[in-house]
Amino acid sequence: MTTLAIVDPPLRRLFARLDFAPRPAQKSLSDLLEGWESLRGAAVAPELARAKEAAPANAFIFARDEGARDFILRRPSLGLERLTGLAEAGGRLSASPELRHAVRLRRLFETIIDAGEPLLAEFAAEGHEDASLVVDLLAAPLADSEGRIVGIFGGCEMRRSLGGEARPAHRATRAQDPAIFALGRMGGLAEKIAHQLGTIVSAHEERRFEDGEHKIRPLTGVRNRDVYVLADLVSSGGESVNDKLCKLLFFIGALKQSAAARVNVIAPYLCYGRKERQTKPRDPVATRYLAQMFEAVGCDCVVTVAAHDLAAFQNAFRIETEHLDLHALFAHALAPHLAGKEVAVVSPDPGGEKRAELFRETLERVLGAPVTKALVDKKRSMGQVTGELFAGDVAQRTAIVVDDMISTGGTMTRAAVACRRNGATEVIALAAHGLFSGEAEKFLHDPSIDQIWIADGLPVSAKVKGAVAEGRLRIVETAGLLADVIRALHAGGSINALLEHAVSPFPVAEG
């Protein structure tokens, strides 16, 4: 629940975000919240005395001085010192050399004590020596032995705001700032991207009527703004891909009707990309029809990741498109695992040969060592897959089978078995999109494959999380890259330069 709507206007003006249901994007603050919950147990709040002994090193602790309407620092932290100048236990918040921030924190702490709940806040560091900083602050109540709220437990992190300029909280929706919306299951990724940009995910409303029709609209003003909509275009949670596509198209139309200056769709996986040409008489060319629908509702730009057929994607649209390959991102993430090994990159079918070759070249640059290549023959007709030809050298090597997506996993499994038959010592299946439909659970545990690597552009379903926990499925984060892409689009920068130097943290071990 957003708290901004229920607090006094003077307090609202101090913060860009207040939330009594914290979901910190930064790992350090997320770990702090987990630590507070662990200390709390079944109580409303942990005891202050126990928290002083057991709290994480990056946590600060204040005790309330009720008579003086002040707070006394019981445990300092580096982040708090940067924000307030208070570096030693015993210092009073009112004695902080950063008076503006001290007043802000006192008001925030009083709100937490009244509510008895942890709270996540965001505000611009106006008056700080580095005026481009935005502060993310997590604060939670502490109690005495009788359960009365008598202190504050928390931590803060600083980051640079979008464009390198501080944004006062009351100007958080100014027209030149981009607005970010998340449809479907894209909320988690959108939150990470927004955090990187120093902004928040804008609210929208979705309503479903009894007859199956629906309504969708933005709840944030978008007039003259640059808007980015993250879209999840795969069937899930009782909604078909057609349901989600229809909602997205209607939402684009609503944004344009609400005077958005520019609407950019970011669909890491763009649906209907596999039917990009006629292979049988009177076949549809769905990719072109999809492009026409986006154009019809007023979409200005479509951004996607690892299109099934890049030429078809680029030629289908008459509006601006941006295609993001993840070659560098995957290569840097894989490099520690491949150090000192002989490596081969394998295309699981002739249609993916160019994609595999581009990845092989990138991986060779990153590793600084030769990488061989191989190709598995494949022909699909009427749902039947045939082809036994194998070309290339994978003997005594780690074979990386590269494709744009994994659906049921059948193509990857055929290629992995062929690699094993030709002497590969290890097989890694790598794809940008993990759809994991149909019999994918069987694929996830196939003995011919040692590891599966995907990007996080699509959320991982519950049935797949077991493979994540086992370490068989590795997920590479794309939030940093997508945030940089939004910055570049918003400011007119180069996308190609970003892709060439894209580096992700080591793959996350969670879904």
Image (spheres, grey):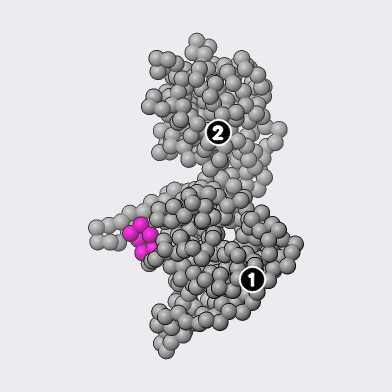
Where does residue 135 sit, x and y in percent of width and height? 59, 36
Image mark count: 2
Which mark is drawn over residue 505?
none
Query: Helix, strand, or loop for circle 2?
Result: strand
Residue 454 higher or lower than 189, as above or below: below
Amino acid under disc 2: Leu
Foreground residue among 502 and 454? 454
Q: In the figure, residue 101 lies in which quadrant?
A: top right
Query: Helix, strand, or loop for circle 1?
Result: loop
Residue at mark 2: 137
Residue at mark 1: 395
What secondary structure do most residues of the magenta stretch adopt?
loop
Residue farthest to the top? 67
- The part of the chain drawn in magenta is 235-240
Residue 33: tell me if it is visible.
yes
Which residue does the image show at 60% across and 68% down from the upper left?
424
Residue 344 higher or lower than 84, as above or below: below
State which tag comes first along the sequence, 1 or 2. 2
Residue 189: tell me if it is visible.
no
Where does residue 232 sit, x and y in percent of width and height? 45, 60
Which residue does the image show at 33% across and 54% down from the upper left?
207
Where does residue 484 sit, x and y in percent of width and height? 63, 54
